[in-house]
Image (cartoon, rainbow, N blue to C red):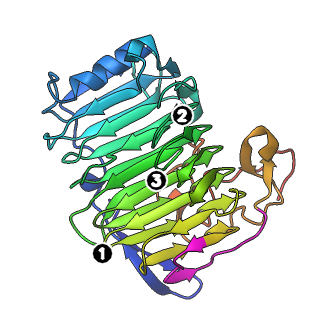
Amino acid sequence: MLAYSHRRRAHGACIFVLAASAAVLAPCASAHDFCVADAAGLQQALAAVSDGGAFVDEDSTIRVVAGSYATGAATGDAPFTSVAMRTTHALAIEGGYDTGCTQRAFPAAATVLDGQEATGVMVLGRPNGALAVSHLTFTRGNADVGVGLQVNYDLSPARPVSIDHVIVRDNHASGMSAGGLYAVGSAPAANAVAVLLDASLISGNSGRSGGGAYVMANQGVAAVTFTTIVGNSSTVNGDGLLCAHGPGSTCYLRGVVAWGNDTSSVHFISYRDNIGVCNDIDLRTGYPFYGEADNRSVDPGFVGPANGDYHLRGDSPLLRACPWPAYGATDLDDRPYPSSGLADPSFGAYGDTVFADGSEP
């Protein structure tokens, strides 16, 4: 169950309640499962759960065996695509599986979807059914908008979107917005999660607005939690993260490291109801936080940023320093947080990395 109050333990003051049902965030028990091991099989599964597909009106899970999947001939020189405009059924796409999909055995870095710098990487449209995407890497996309992962672009979704344990890197958008990730969702209540981005890395993307990621809640909460957003750029605003929400809704950031993103690491385009706790942000633009606690602006101390290694060094001021619980159970490397995240997790996508750089905190 994901409904609980997040309290700052040092003071016992609850400044915001983020409530959501697990059934709202993720698909129901699947009626049809796919196991795919090549690019053609992945696109065939996506087509089968799209409009006109055999399984569009069933809750479905597409399990992806760890490996590399490139757009091109297998996708008709287009992104991996699934569009289902009418169905109310849920879809989950999960990477990191072993051969035969008997268990998820590998982290997000092991399952790579590659646009080969010629197409977008993945496009999903399911406005009336819940979507969940996890344990995948989206890279080298080159297209118009939401190039790495595009969810519900130019739609008015009525259901939530959950994205966790993903890596979105080195994608470029030439059009309206969102070089790396574009995701819009909606929730049935103002304090329920409409879009969740958790335990993820957004790096090296570029675009017009929201160079790294653009997330929006039409109704409900756009929540970005324990995610690292670094080295992204845009030509307008929101080089790292651009967050937006409808009237009475909320942008909620917790445990985010947004650092070194051209001229702006976080940009809010919606007034009020922007909440931030336990984040490390070097430059924030647009509207301010309406409520915040335990936010910082300090060098994160990455292990090897020049080589794309955004784990925290043993001397990082962010290591095991967040007095707020992690949202999920594991970090981007699939390592469990201490006591399910209740014992001072580290900021950003990666948890306790003692000895990762040969040092100890």
Dominant SS in magenta: loop
Asked whether the beta carbons under mark 2 and mark 3 sit within 8 Å of each other, the answer is no
**Amino acid type, mark 2:** Thr
Decide: is 54 above or below 177: above
Residue marked by disc 3: 197
Q: Which mark is residue 224?
A: none
Q: Which mark is residue 137?
A: 2
Where does the image place residue 340, in percent across and percent down from the top left? 51, 57
Mark 2 secondary-structure assignment: strand
Which residues make up the magenta segment? 285-299
Mark 1 secondary-structure assignment: loop
Name the N-terminal-most of marks 2 and 3. 2
- Is disc 3 surrounded by few (<14), some (14 to 19) or many (20+) residues within 10 Å? many
Residue marked by disc 1: 247
Decide: is 340 above or below 98: below
Residue 331 in sight from this viewpoint: no
Q: Nearer the viewer, residue 269 or 48?
A: 269
**Residue at (38%, 76%) from the top-left corner?**
17
Q: Nearer the viewer, residue 164 or 275?
A: 275
- Work out which quarter of the rendered image holds the C terminus and state it: bottom right
Where does the image place residue 248, in percent across and percent down from the top left? 30, 77
**Amino acid type, mark 1:** Pro
Where does the image place residue 289, in percent across and percent down from the top left? 52, 79
Where does the image place residue 207, in percent across and percent down from the top left? 56, 47
**Residue at (40%, 63%) from the top-left corner?**
222
Asked whether the beta carbons under mark 1 and mark 3 sit within 8 Å of each other, the answer is no
Q: Is residue 286 magenta?
A: yes
- Is disc 2 surrounded by few (<14), some (14 to 19) or many (20+) residues within 10 Å? many
Decide: is 229 above or below 166: below
